């Protein structure tokens, strides 16, 4: 169980067959990201628990190729152009190409981008909307669409900064 207090929210992890990725490795990285003290569990409003296939879960985090992620996201009316990840009710869909290479000019290691992608899409699952860069040179809020550009902010992967929820202006 990730986190120390609050309602228990269960999730599964799935990796597309034939994508060349080890599901155990992906699951371990997801656990490390979501269990980090800077992630969503810092609020102590809920805990997260990864459960096995077949167990009851609120959502599934999928790692899927660009073509598959586009098809999955399109079922919910989203056009990702085979580039971005997305979230639909009960589905956090991570684009494998972004997972492996991040995005041009991100300015941070792929591991930072991976933490951002998981925290951003899980943030949507937890009810968070998009946010804007608060000021040039500031860390980018995790709910900023960093995949589409940092807009003057610096790459930042976490919902919490120095123990406090870090946000930017809401985007309607």
Image (cartoon, rainbow, N blue to C red):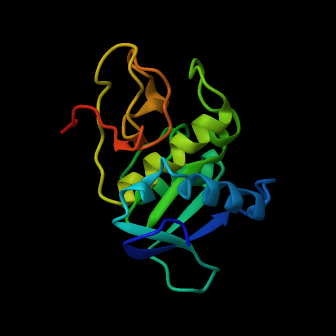
> Quarter of the image holding residue 12?
bottom right
Is the residue 59 above or below the residue 130 in the image? below
Residue beneath the point at 70% across and 39% down: 100
Q: Where is residue 119 in the image (x, y as percent from the top left)?
A: 48, 49
Q: Nearer the viewer, residue 3 or 128?
A: 3
Q: In this view, does 139 lie above or below 137?
A: below
Q: Nearer the viewer, residue 139 or 164?
A: 164
Residue 135: horizontal and vertical position, in percent?
30, 17
Query: Is 154 left or right of 107, judged from the image as shown?
Result: left
Can the viewer see residue 74 in this picture? no
Report the side of 59 relative to 134 (left or right): right
Image location of residue 125, percent across then percent down: 38, 60
Q: Is residue 127 visible?
A: yes
On the image, the x and y values in percent for residue 141 come to: 37, 34
Which image quadrant: the C terminus?
Answer: top left
Q: Which residue is nearer to you in this view: 29 or 151? A: 29
């Amino acid at each position: 169980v990730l986190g120390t207090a609050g309602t228990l929210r269960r999730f599964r992890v799935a990796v597309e067959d034939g994508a060349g990725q080890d599901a155990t490795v992906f699951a371990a990285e997801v656990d490390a990201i979501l269990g980090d003290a800077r992630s969503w569990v810092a609020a102590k409003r809920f805990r997260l628990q990864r459960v096995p296939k077949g167990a009851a879960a609120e959502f599934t985090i999928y790692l899927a190729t660009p073509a598959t992620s586009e098809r999955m996201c399109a079922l919910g009316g989203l056009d990702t152009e085979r580039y971005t990840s997305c979230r639909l009710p009960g589905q956090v869909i991570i684009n494998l190409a972004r997972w492996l290479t991040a995005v041009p000019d991100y300015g941070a290691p792929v591991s930072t981008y991976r933490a951002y992608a998981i925290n951003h899409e899980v943030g949507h699952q937890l009810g968070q909307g998009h946010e804007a860069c608060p000021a040039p040179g500031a860390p980018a809020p995790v709910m900023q669409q960093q995949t589409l550009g940092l807009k003057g902010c610096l790459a930042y992967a976490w919902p919490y900064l120095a123990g406090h929820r870090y946000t930017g202006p809401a985007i309607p």
